[in-house]
Image (cartoon, rainbow, N blue to C red):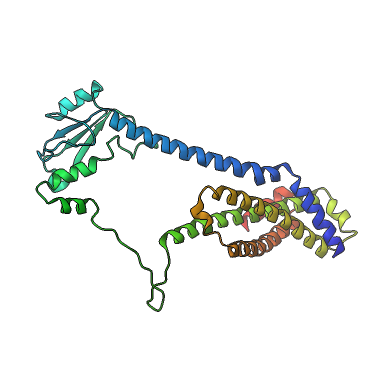
Amino acid sequence: MTKAWVVARHEFLVTVRRVWFVLATFVFPLLSLGVIALMFMIQVNTINETKASALAKPLGVVDLSGELEKDPASFKILRFKDEAEARQALARRDVTACLIVSPDWVATGDMKVLTTRRATLLTAERTPLPPSLEPWLIENLLKGVEAERRKRARAPFAPEMVYLNDAGLDSGEDPDAIKQRSVVAYIFFFLLFMSIFSSSQYLLQGMAEEKENRVMEMVLTSITPRELMLGKLVGLGGAGLLQLACWSTMGLAGSAFIPAFVLVLEPAAFAVCFAYFLLGYLLYGSLMLGFGSLGANFRESQPMASLG
């Protein structure tokens, strides 16, 4: 076991000093978080710009149904008699969007939106319409109906979900907590997947390279194959655990900005994650060692590992 420990320490130190290990452990996660944050900021900024542009100029309205008699209080509109007049106003940039209400709007709900704003990936599904357009349409649709019913029509129901256990009793589960636990589970799955397969790949690469360079023949003169395999598994497993610990620490540091997620990170989850890492690594690591020993070099071992 002493020789296996020497091999394990050597594999661990060699692996953690590799440039790609340092990049994968520290640099790539930070870059990924930065890209996600940037995309989120761009999306929020695009939504805000769409809302601002919708309120900067009046909304053109062509009411062919005759139902939109009452003007909105929260935004301005310009009424046009037909679609041709509305298109001319759009060409003059008097409005940025125009709502064409069909004659049978009450029966079918058909409407058409004309706009000079060009569609992009983020704005294609977000029409440049005022946020309070729908309440205004409901007000006109329900004219003559008492105020209390109009208010309820805007929010017809507010369901409260109650989850029962097998005995038919209230389980006390919170839907928000369930969603948060699901997100955390996906995050842990991604961390386990990346750490297990990166560590196993190092095993495959190291074994194949040592065979190709004839290092394995010299090593086996002073150590048994069982001790060598055990040392490689333990050493690279330690490197994988270090990588997993770094990713988890960065994830916890990032979750400090989202207090709702911190509440569902139970200590038992880390123990389960550790156990799954060991089991998964032993399985895939043993397979990679076997494939690495079968091939004469890394080029031959990698296709076999991919097929396996």
Left or right? Give the position of 80 relative to 211: left
- Asked if 181 appears above or below 134 in the picture, the reply is below
Image location of residue 276, percent across then percent down: 62, 63
Left or right? Give the position of 260 relative to 117: right
Regarding residue 5, the answer to whether it shows in the image is yes
- Which residue corresponds to the image point at 87% horizontal and 58% vertical from the top-left? 220
Q: Residue furthest bottom?
A: 167
From the viewer's side, name the closer residue of 16 and 286: 16
Q: Which residue lies furthest to the top in this view?
A: 92
Left or right? Give the position of 57 relative to 1: left
Q: How many labels does the image show?
A: 0
Q: Which residue lies furthest to the right in this view?
A: 222
Image location of residue 22, percent across then percent down: 70, 44
Image location of residue 67, percent across then percent down: 11, 41
- Asked if 307 appears above or below 213 in the picture, the reply is below
Q: In which quarter of the image is residue 188?
A: bottom right
Quadrant into which the C terminus falls: bottom right
From the viewer's side, name the closer residue of 199 and 46: 46
- Which residue corresponds to the image point at 51% horizontal and 42% vertical from the top-left? 36
Regarding residue 296, the answer to whether it shows in the image is no
Q: In which quarter of the image is residue 83?
A: top left
Quadrant into which the N terminus falls: bottom right
From the viewer's side, name the closer residue of 105 and 247: 247
- Which residue corresponds to the image point at 34% horizontal and 37% vertical from the top-left? 124
Image location of residue 71, percent across then percent down: 16, 36
